[in-house]
Image (spheres, rainbow, N blue to C red):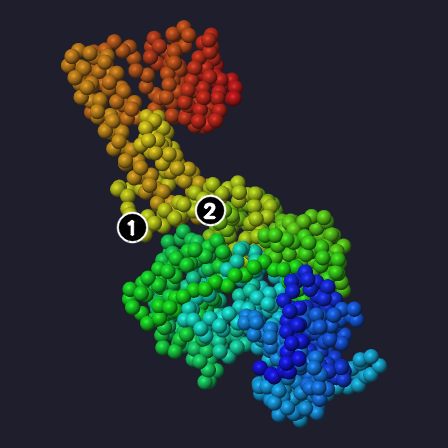
Amino acid sequence: MPSTSSASQSEADACITAVAWSDEELGVSRNRIRALPRIFISHASANDIEAKAFKLHLVDCGIAPDDVFVDHDDGVQAHTKWKDALAVANAAAGALICLVSPEWLASRWSQIEVGVAEQLRRMDRHQRRAIIIAMLPGTTRAEMQAKGFTEDQITDLAEPGAVTVIRKVAVKDASRDVTFSSRSLEKIRHSLDSLGILAETFDWEPRNPKRPSPFPGLEAFSEKEAGVFFGRERRLTEALSEIEDKLAQSPARIMSIVAASGVGKSSFLRAGLWPRLKRRSSYLPLPILKQGSRGIVSDQEGGLIHTMAGWFSEKEQSVDSGWVRSQLGTPISRDGLGKVLAEAIQLAPPGAAPRLLLGLDQAEELFDTTDRDKIAEREQFLAALFGLLSNPARGIDLLVVATIRADSLGPMCEAIAAARGVAEREIVPNVAGLGHWSFPLEPMSTTDYRSVIEKPVEVAYRKAGTLGRKAPQSFEAALVEHLVKTFTGKDALPLLAIALDQLYTEHIAQNVITLDHYKSLYGDEGASGPIRHALENAYKNAGEVGTPEHLRRLIIPELATWDDEAGAAKRIPTQTAVLLSGERARLEPLVEAMVEARLLVRDRETIEVAHEALLRQEPLGGWLEENKGALRQRRDVLREANEWKAAQTSPDGPLPPWDEAAKQAEQLARSRARRASGDTASEFLVRRGDRLVSAIRLAGDPDYRSLREVAGPYLQACLAAESAQDERQRRIIGTAFVKPALQALEEGLSDHALRLAVAGAVLADDLDLRLVPELSGPVGKAIHSTRIRSILCGHRGSVAIAAFSPDGRRIVTASDDNTARVWDVERGSEIATLKGHEGPVQSAAFSPDGRRIVTASYDNTARVWDVERGSEIATL
């Protein structure tokens, strides 16, 4: 540490005390400094012009003016305690640049500034702060080293060679050109870049050059958008320091970035952490993986094969996905993964031995799937990955950095614990490599929100200027305040992002985007306004399929489901070929319109909702709430179907044709309901039959076509198994009446024998005696010797009820064949068939005068009939 006098040190301690105050206590000082800076320039008053020139140079390099604090002109007014304001600015900054001159060396205030920076660096181990000594003419390296500064901190702005001239720098009444060493300026710039404190030091490549908005809407920021990713500078600095500390002090090699949905985990990883780690020679970041519709290892975008092949291609290596797949093996193994990573580490700079970094974005999707193939692939991938962490291949030191929702951290920890158990049993050399630590990512502060809103516009404005394009210069202060107050609570960040994208895009020709522009889009609507606006545009651009009903069919059930554990909707990445198959094929224009509105994301093979925040907004939130029962059932059936397939269970006998499955299942359920005796076992069977009917009906819904394709064989097998079990039970019931009926015949009790046989047939739900043919003998003999006058035959289903007319001349019967029939008692012949019901008829009765019949059906209607004509009079 540079040496400071005891007096200067106590002054520095006093400044530190000021820094330790709360934000509220320091509010006055903070407000009088226009924005909290990230670079603090310490200089003597004799060098005001050099300090201003240096700041102008940094601004020319793309650094925002508010991010550079120079104490002579940055809002430190006479009535503000200079020391307090200095402490606030220094505490916020990530770099202290000292413009050293003889006057600076003689100033005790300069020593205080250095002391504050050093004290803060020691106190907050997660905050990376640099002290850069930039020598002005009249000072030497020897003097700096005598003060305790190290060689890597010292830069000579007056060294010989190429120079950069900042012309006509004016401070008060003085004005002149200032010359700095170009090489030294570049060295300082590189030092600032390596700190990773400034987003402006990264490039920004608009994802749509025709609509160059610096805001990604509901999507996460990508690595190419690191230059416009703001608001997380402090947490990024802390994360970088924490990674360095953990790797230096602990063998643990799994880090999880944990936060609730909507906080910005993916952007933090992709546009924040990864670009900064790439600038450090001690790390070699590999691609960031994300589970897609075909798994985590696939050659689909986000899969290990695809991303590694792309990574090698960027390094100008002749490696394709086929080579990566062949090295990983089928299935993927620890050794295979080690081969690919060993090849990657060969591309590190000569002499470097960097740690490899592998990103895993939205890790909850790994553990939240019912797909049998994805589950198997996940287990293989984790076994290979954890195997490499606990038993590293030669020369490979790998850190896994995952983002995961807070409510999904449990399954990940369980998987790590299980892997540790395996590693301990196998006595591998580095079980501790499976150590895991979490890095929480909290919602942003109000100050951070302002940075998110204002700074990307500044970057885009500067870039537009270099390209000769027009772009907004800023957001009006009143608009910024309105946005900060409006977008609060859960999903505030993604909803704010889509609002900013819409505002910027629709008013790109304006110099300043104002609150009036905001109200012209959303009126006085709250945070839901941007979603409504985006949906309206999507409907308009989708043509005839641009309706809420078509959107509901597009989203449910293929792009969203219901997560019971989280108690919320969850998005699903779905293959385009699956989503746009069958009747949904005509929804392609709606998909394109939703992608254009940045509400859906589409890559080469997959479509998914841009952010789960969309699923919590109306109308989608309401639809998902209404359909959560069906979505829950779909999820359960898919899970059971995958378990059934994994067990390779096959039904006894052929499966029933699908077209007949629903009808057969309903007959099974009705049969069980009729036979239910009220005991626990029979009620259980009834509920199981009802559940099967419900599942088969759901799979028959055109919107749930994929459920039928995946789980159809399982449901048919369930139906076959249930039907076989049901027939066995019914046969046991029916055959129990055969012997008593025969015994009654032997005793000459033919009527009693007939009643016993009929009871057996009814209880077995076997009126045609197909299932229990042994009852046909007692029935025939009993009829031959009984006083029964006629048997009424004609129904094609079981008869639920029969009733006489008031005069006794007619009988009406109601049946499962969806009809009721009227019979002549004297002749035993059918008079009329009452057709019209679309479901089984459960009851029928004559009117008191015998001229009308009323029937009730499972089709939720009752109907009134004319007895003589056999025609329907009314539907109730």
Q: Is residue 810 above or below residue 492?
A: above
Residue reaching furthest top?
Answer: 807
Residue reaching furthest right?
Answer: 173
Q: Residue at x 27, y 19 (%)?
A: 758
Three-letter amino acid code at disc 1? Gln
Give how far apart the Cα atoms at labels 2 and 1 are: 28 Å
Q: Which mark is residue 564?
A: 2
Element marked by disc 1: loop
Q: Is residue 91 above or below residue 176?
A: above
Q: How many marks?
A: 2
Image quadrant in which you'd find residue 855:
top left
Q: Which residue is mark 1?
A: 648
Image quadrant in which you'd find residue 724:
top left
**Percent coordinates x, y for residue 492 in the rendering:** 62, 54
In this view, the residue in front, 207 or 460, is 460
**Percent coordinates x, y for residue 651 in the rendering:** 28, 43
Pick the quarter of the image with the N terminus. Answer: bottom right
Residue reaching furthest bottom?
Answer: 160
Q: Residue at x 50, y 63 (%)?
A: 439
The local crowd at label 1, few if under 14, some if 14 to 19, many if 20 or more residues have their Cα within 10 Å, is few
Q: Is residue 400 left or right of residue 190?
A: left
Element marked by disc 2: loop
In this view, the residue in front, 861 or 31, is 31
The local crowd at label 2, few if under 14, some if 14 to 19, many if 20 or more residues have their Cα within 10 Å, is few
User: Is residue 461 in sight in this rendering?
Assistant: no
Q: Is residue 365 left or right of residue 715?
A: right
Three-letter amino acid code at disc 2? Asp
